[in-house]
Amino acid sequence: MTPLLELTDVRRSYPSGDGDVEVLKGISLTINAGEMVAIMGASGSGKSTLMNILGCLDKPTSGSYRIAGVDVGKLDADALASLRREHFGFIFQRYHLLAHLTAEQNVEVPAIYAGLPQQARRRRALELLTRLGLENRVDYRPGQLSGGQQQRVSIARALMNGGQVILADEPTGALDSHSGEEVMETLRQLCARGHTVVIVTHDPQIAAQAQRVIEIRDGEIIRQSAPGEGVLSVVNIERHAPPASSWRQALSRFREAFAMAGLAMAANKMRTLLTMLGIIIGIASVVSIVVVGDAAKQLVLEDIRAIGTNTIDIYPGKDFGDDDPGFQQALKYDDMQAIAQQPWVSSATPSVSKNVRVRYGNIDAAASANGVSSQYFNVYGMTFSEGGTFNDRQLQGQSQVVVLDSNTKKQLFPNKLKVVGEVILVGSIPATVIGVAEEKQSMFGSSKILRVWLPYTTMTSRVAGQNWLNSITVRVKDGYDSHTAEQQLNRLLELRHGKKDFFTYNMDGLLKTAENTTRTLQLFLTLVAVISLVVGGIGVMNIMLVSVTERTREIGIRMAVGARAGDVLQQFLIEAVMVCLVGGALGMGLSMMIAFILQLFLPGWQIGLSPLALLTAFMCSTLTGVIFGWLPARNAARLSPVDALSRE
Ligand code: ADP
Ligand code: MG
């Protein structure tokens, strides 16, 4: 018969000062299935060290340890975790229950890592607690239970996954004699049911209750009776329901990690909130900048588009400011007609302007009179608050009609609401007001000049007395590249004039410049926002690192009952991501508020939470969680179970 547990010349030493101190000095022992063995020795003799090796929490420095014939030294961390989970049940002197979980939840923990479905888990936990007489204490937290009750909860936990081998390290050490008796009685019953029970104790009376006593002193076995023969050759321990399939297991473990992360966050509300603050501010600034920046950009671009991006202005001369008299008269009415006939031109409107005085009654003011075509207002996206533009007949007939801008209306008619039909003097000619045009409100502000518009025919013949045009504005058909149009326009006019005595100006350039400027600005602001997000992330990392240190014992307990390193990593990562996601959601809320308030003060701004902003926030918070949670989570997962357990 292969012994269940077999140690051969096991040594364990700890580094201390200059050299190593050997705590176990060549322990050899065998324990058969179904035995109840007591390991007895004085305090400091190495009992717990031995127990940790038996329970695969620790590895011997040298020597071999076989479980049912399998050499433990050759197993990796996950296989050891699986051994602890499936075969061992630990009972500690100080119970080692998780303080923020109820009795029932504590008992469930090993089964979570085994991937048992929730209902089966709960049923079995209740059954075990009932069997141990704790049916009325199921929802109590460890702090609300007596020592004896806590120890019974930890026994239930040890049995959760079967607990083929129960390892009890001074199980009665912290209990009064009555509770101690009860615990010992329970352990004896378990042995009778087929569990192998190993008890560590310094108390000879407790040891006497076992079938066999192994006595150690200073890391050496000084006395042991022969392994019990014929106690039990077959392990007939009740098995709980078979674990679910592997992906279901993974899913259920993930869900549990989620729930545990939630519990851990709830247990430290204030700290969680403060941690989140960094993320909230970070996400709020990222989202606000994306959203508000987008709105501002749209606004600027729209303003420029309203002026007309597909319009090309043609002026006489070489460039703005050129007043060479030889070029002044370069643009003629014929030029405009030739341009208007081009297939890619949607409309062309001339402009003849002159500074004149306008007069109504005894009020008189300086204004710029512009001769334009009726399409002018359309091209520049202007609306009429009153009246309208002139028609073709008025244009052909050189009618003496005039459109005012709102500044002129205010100046000439300070007390009149309706001015259409009034006759004013433009320069020396009388003209009837037919409309009041409103300039489109733009971010650049509206000009304070007074402007009036007349049919260009009227303007050339009657007001300015000139037969040349000051400028031509060409509107390019939609879908036609304005750059190509500009080239063709240049070629056409050069051909007509025989020389280049004009220049063109295209709003497209301005649009591109504006686009670039806003993009640069947005990039810069985003950088600032990202920095605040990084600061928030570092805050999360800080708190998570503290949390890992603070919860080292919890991690040790989880590992002792069978959590893999991956489970611990996952739990802490999920916690970090959850902090960041909740913070991200709150940050989104905050940025929505900012957007709402901005909208109150800046009408006209189209602030909307785009899917892009939502996605950005989600990605940013998840990434922050993963990036800054990873280091603490890895630290937690790398802890060795014994070290973690012994930390207070
Ligand atoms: P027992 O459980 O029998 O009281 P332990 O097995 O806990 O004794 O410890 C035995 C000896 O090993 C003690 O002298 C203790 O100081 C030493 N020891 C235990 N753990 C460590 C450790 N992690 N590092 C250094 N020495 C240790
Ligand atoms: Mg001990």
Image: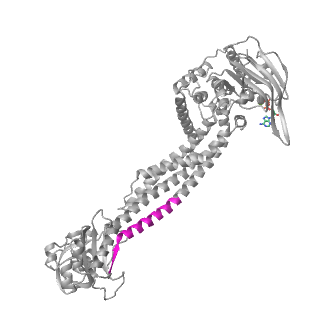
Image coords of residue 150 (percent x, y): 66, 27
Q: Residue furthest top?
A: 230
Query: In this picture, is 387 found above or below 567?
Result: below
Residue at position x 19%, y 87% in the image: 428
Q: Is residue 245 left or right of residue 489?
A: right
> What's the colour scheme?
one colour
From the viewer's side, name the closer residue of 621 and 425.
621
Q: Is residue 165 above or below residue 303?
A: above
Principal secondary structure, stretch drawn in magenta: helix
Image-quadrant location for residue 597? bottom left
Judge whether residue 520 is colored magenta: yes
Quadrant (top left, top right, bottom left, bottom right) of the C terminus: top right
Identify which residue is drawn at 22% across, 86% down. Answer: 466
Q: Quadrant of residue 228?
A: top right
Q: Which residues are magenta?
A: 502-528
Residue 453: image location, x then y, percent? 23, 77
- Which quadrant is the N terminus positioned in? top right
**Residue 172 visible, this angle:** no
Q: Position of residue 535 (x, y in %)?
A: 58, 55
Q: Is residue 123 above or below residue 606?
A: above
Number of marks present in the image shown: 0
Can residue 548 be seen? Answer: yes
Position of 469 relative to 247 (above/below): below
Q: Position of residue 523 (x, y in %)?
A: 49, 61
Which residue lies at the image location 52% right of the left edge and 48% below the top edge?
621
Q: Nearer the viewer, residue 636 or 146?
A: 636
Residue sitting farthest toward the bottom: 325
Q: Is residue 330 left or right of residue 30?
A: left
Residue 606 falls inside the magenta stretch: no
